[in-house]
Image: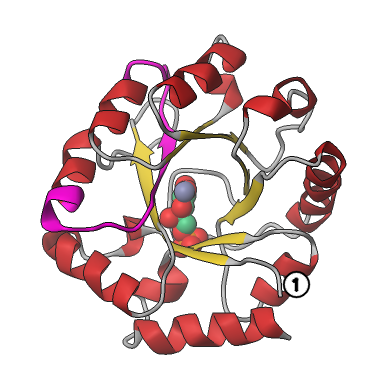
Amino acid sequence: MADYLIAPSILSADFARLGEEVDNVLAAGADIVHFDVMDNHYVPNLTIGPLVCEALRKHGVSAPIDVHLMVEPVDALVPMFAEAGASYITFHPEASRHIDRTLQLIRSCGCKAGLVFNPATPLDCLKYVMDKLDMVLLMSVNPGFGGQSFIPATLGKLREARALIDASGLPIRLEIDGGVKVDNIGAIAAAGADTFVAGSAIFSTPDYAATIARMRAELAE
Ligand code: DX5
Ligand code: ZN
């Protein structure tokens, strides 16, 4: 079986009890913590920054933290999130003037680097920076909010990204973000994703372990 990772998006967690929520979802079988950073500029919403990432590390979270930057500009936040304990840092190519430089900056700070593509953003720049990537993240909703519906055209785009990654021979993860549920995760995996962000699909259910187990059962089929 492929090496699948479940990455709950804490955007849908109860922020008043964030440490406990992250502990609970990891105890329920999640692999990595997806951390959505929104700036009310690149996206029309405002969330959390490096202080909250650092607070989760101080709280004792040892799982990888997957920081999804929906911010513009990007670079100033990279060292701050690296210091705060980020494992992955991903950003949207159109939010950085110098994509290659930002990718190098992320790795030079000791983090894994990734690019995020919105539903209608072409994958064109990928081929020029493949060797500087640890992750490709495809958005299957327009970024800014949890709880939106999966955009079906993303399945074809996943197949395209999977072919590019396989052709490179590099160990790059292919992550999908937005509208991932128990009933579509199997089709999303079949299209090539190996890392699954799920916010509302996990945090809106009473039993996180049961939901994650149902997702894994779909992935095992
Ligand atoms: C949207 C965020 C997502 C969001 C996903 O901009 O990047 O990570 O939390 O939420 P769901 O899984 O509810 O679509
Ligand atoms: Zn995200």
Q: Is residue 151 magenta?
A: no
Residue 44 placement (x, y as % from top left): 40, 36
**Which residue: 44% across, 27% down?**
42
- Figure quadrant of the N terminus: bottom right
Q: Is residue 130 above or below residue 159?
A: above
Q: Which residue is mark 1?
A: 187
- Figure quadrant of the C terminus: bottom right
Say what amino acid the circle numbered 1 marks.
Ala
Residue 62 shown left or right of residue 191 in the figure: left
State whether label 1 is within 8 Å of ligand 1. no
Residue 184 placement (x, y as % from top left): 67, 74
**Which residue: 35% across, 73% down?**
203
Residue 125 placement (x, y as % from top left): 74, 23
Q: Residue 48 falls in which quadrant of the image?
A: top left
Mark 1 is surrounded, within 10 Å at the Cα level, by few (under 14), some (14 to 19) or many (20 or more) other residues, namely: few
Q: Is residue 30 above or below residue 60?
A: below
Q: Which residues are magenta?
A: 56-76
Pick the front one: 53 or 60: 60
Q: Is residue 75 magenta?
A: yes
**Which residue: 78% across, 43% down?**
165
Residue 147 visible in the shown view: no
Q: How is the image coloured?
A: secondary structure
Residue 144 shown left or right of residue 150 in the figure: left
Residue 7 shown left or right of residue 36 in the figure: right
**Which residue: 56% across, 63% down?**
179
Q: Residue 16 falls in which quadrant of the image?
A: bottom left
Q: Secondary structure at mark 1?
A: helix
Q: Is residue 65 above or below residue 93?
A: below
Residue 51 visible in the shown view: yes
Residue 122 shown left or right of residue 115 in the figure: right
Residue 149 placement (x, y as % from top left): 59, 63
